[in-house]
Structures are given as C-alpha cells and as structure tokens.
Image (cartoon, grey):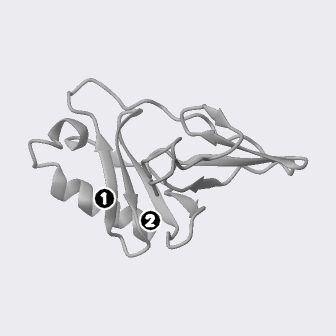
Amino acid sequence: MEPVVEIAAGARQSLESSTRWAAALVGSKVRCPALTVRPLAPRLTAYHLVEIVRDTEVTARFALDDDGMLLEAEGIKETGTRLSPWIVAPVTESGEAAPLVWKPCDQSASRLQPFFEVHRHADVVFVRVDGVTFTQLTVAIGRG
C-alpha cells in the first residue's frame, strides 16, 4: 500500500467516530491508488487525492500533502448518499491519462476539484473533474 494511502486510512479510522464524519466513513475503505495533483501556482506543492468508498460509492475524499497532512476533505452527511462522481481522465495525444493539476482560481477554489490538463496540438484546455472544460484558469483581482 502506498504511504499516503496508509496515512489516509489512519485518518479515516480516527475520523469515523466523529458525528460529523460517521455517515461518510463508517464501514468504508480507502481506494487505491492515490492520485497526485501537480500545482500550477508558485508556493504550492504537489498533493495527493484519496477516495474513500463504501461498496462502489465514493463517500469521502481527502487531499493530503507529501508528509500526510490533511489539507482538505469532503464527505457525505447522510448515509445512503454519495459524492458526485468524477469523469474518467481524458487521454492525451500520446495515449496516456491527462495529468491532474490545480491552483486556486475562479473555476476551482478547492483542492478537491482539480483539473485534467489536456494538450491538443498547440492548445491547452483544463477539464475539471466534474467534466466542465475551460480554455483558461482565471483569478479575479484581489483573490489568490
């Protein structure tokens, strides 16, 4: 098991007794492998996304840094529900899965909503994990 997945499993176990996290974590397990997200902004570092599943449904997601510090998390609040699924990674021209990237921007303020960076000829598009496509990532003045 990857070290970051082991750390996520420990975080899952310690949070599941919390009333806030019980619906998302009781009876769940960490899905392997973790996904690595490359930063698109200075001062940010790469991080890892781990999905928590019950049966086949995603009930929580954790963003962890290389040291295993929990940066951000989301989870269902009611048993029997699930988080919105992510799209399958687009394939690049070379036949590989597009890499995940992120920076805080108008299109995503959450590390849990990164983008697939897709290069097509001379163009780059950013496909958010929910399937919405952007030709650029913007930051309103006074933000970021």
The circle on residue 78 is none
Judging from the image, what secondary structure is the residue with disc 1 in? Answer: helix
The residue under label 1 is which amino acid type?
Answer: Ala
- Residue 67: where, in percent of width, then height? 38, 76
Which mark's residue is nearer the viewer, 2 or 1? 1
Pick whichever, 49 or 133, lies toward us.
133
Residue occupied by mark 1: 9
* Rendered view: 58 above or below 110: above
User: Farthest right residue?
Assistant: 121
- Residue 125 sits in quarter: top right
Determine the image quadrant of residue 66. bottom left
Q: Residue at x 61, y 53 (%)?
A: 100
* Residue 88, horizontal then vertical, whole percent: 62, 37
| Closer to the camera in the image, 135 or 30 | 135
Q: Amino acid at mark 2?
A: Met
**Callout 2: SS:** loop
- As drawn, 142 above or below 127: below
Residue visible at 56% across and 71% down? 42
Q: Residue furthest top?
A: 80
**Real-space Cα separation, disc 2 to disc 1, in angstroms:** 10 Å
**Residue 1 tag number:** 2
Q: Residue at x 20, y 56 (%)?
A: 13
Circles 2, 1 touching at the beta carbon (< 8 Å): yes
Q: Position of residue 123 (x, y in %)?
A: 84, 46
Q: Residue furthest front?
A: 141
In the image, 1: left or right of 91? left
Which image quarter holds the N terminus?
A: bottom left
Q: Nearer the viewer, residue 52 or 136?
A: 136
